[in-house]
Image (cartoon, rainbow, N blue to C red):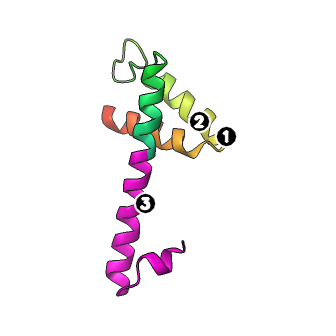
Amino acid sequence: MAFEKMFDRDEAWREQAIDEWAVDQTADDMKVKLGIKRAEGRGGWHDELECTTYQLMTMLHDHVERGDWLDVCTLAMMLHMRA
């Protein structure tokens, strides 16, 4: 469905609605993928001793190169939470 049809109101409301919808959808997708990875035994991003900021930055760069945008969002979130 086109964004224009989903959010057909005045321009300011439409822009805000699209932004919030996109953030909510991305967050939902991130939560699903994080849950899958936890079930596979992955985790520890929040512990600098277990996963350094440098490691997260390297993974972020690698995922940008691959075009894996959901993982880019997730890794950016992890780095943001450390700031």
Q: Amino acid at mark 1?
A: Glu
Q: Which residues are the magenta region?
A: 1-28
Label 2, label 3: how many angstroms apart (C-alpha)? 23 Å
Indicate which disc residue 22 carries: 3
Return the residue nearer the eye: 62 or 18: 18
Tag in front: 3 or 1 = 3
Residue 67 in percent (x, y) is at 65, 44
Judge whether 30 appears above or below 11 on screen: above
At 43% from the left and 60% from the top, the residue drawn is: 22
Mark nearer the N terminus (3 vs 1): 3
Return the x and y of residue 68 as percentages of the image width and height. 61, 42
Q: Is residue 83 visible?
A: no
Q: Residue, x 40% and y 23% (percent of image)?
A: 45
Is 50 in front, or is 22? 22
Q: Main secondary structure of the magenta part?
A: helix
Q: Are marks 1 and 2 in contact (CB under 8 Å)?
A: yes
Quick one: label 3, few (<14), some, or many (20+) residues within 10 Å?
A: few
For disc 2, the marked residue is 61
15 drawn magenta: yes
